[in-house]
Image (tube, rainbow, N blue to C red):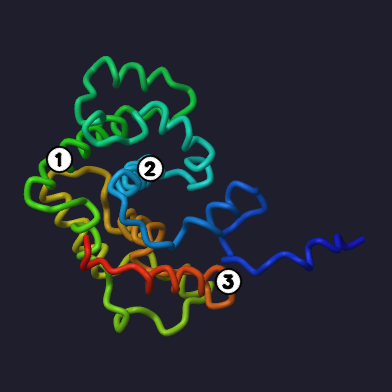
Amino acid sequence: MTDPNLSEQPIRCFWVDGSQIYRDYHDSEWGFPVYEDRRLFEKICLEGFQSGLSWITILKKRENFRAGFANFRLAEVARFGDKDIERLMQDAGIVRHRGKIEAAINNARCAEKLLESESSLAAYFWKFEPSPKSRPQRITRETLRSMTQCAESVALSKDLKKRGWKFVGPTTMYAFMQAMGLVNDHEETCFVREAALQARKAFDPNTL
């Protein structure tokens, strides 16, 4: 027998599974513009931890990551030392990968260095927002499956690597751009797409 509630479900992007945590993330976070440095730093760290894993795995552990990494407060993570690395390696609530843990700490220090020349992380990252003219005319399931990076994510990756950042490849940076609203990759049929578009229209990166 068909569940009558299923017919009442809004249409979402194809990658959203049936879990509430994933639906909530998709509906209220993914693709909406972010201009808070702490959230941007958190996301770029978590994208690094996701490498080789599924995002839902990281999403389920996000609160544990926040607890372990001082809520991703840049100045505190940058001061982490060997004891913190060992503490995190014993934390079953996160992904215990030494290279990724060390990369997050390294990236905090690189971010501090970047802030010597940039007014904020947000001001830096939003410089890499793709021009609307370079974007596909329609975002479909097929488009999303074939589009794993763009010229701007490649440029962002190269610049970060030159600055010493780690786990910031062009595909990882494209996922970061999708999540933080630098691109709106909600499908045309997704009920969230218009809300994300309006949020972007209301945000002016020139004020950063």
Residue that extends furthest to the right in the rendered view of this protein: 1
Q: Comparing marks 3 and 1, which lies closer to the viewer?
A: 1
- Are the residues tagged 1 and 2 within 8 Å (C-beta)? no
Mark 2 residue type = Leu
Instruction: Identify the residue at the far left of this view.
Output: 117
The residue where tag 3 is placed is: 190
| First reached walking from the N terminus: tag 3 or tag 1 | 1
The answer for how far apart the CA atoms under marks 3 and 2 are is 25 Å
Answer above or below: position of 41 versus 96.
below
Task: Locate the C terminus by quadrant.
Answer: bottom left
Q: Position of residue 49 (x, y in %)?
A: 37, 40
Mark 1 closeness class: few <14, some 14–19, many ≥20 residues within 10 Å: some
The disc label shown at residue 112, or none: 1
Q: CA distance from mark 3 to mark 1?
A: 38 Å
The quarter of the picture where residue 111 lies is top left
Q: Position of residue 178 (x, y in %)?
A: 39, 62
The amino acid sitting under disc 3 is Cys
Mark 1 residue type = Glu
SS class of the residue under badge 1? Answer: helix
Residue designated by label 2: 46
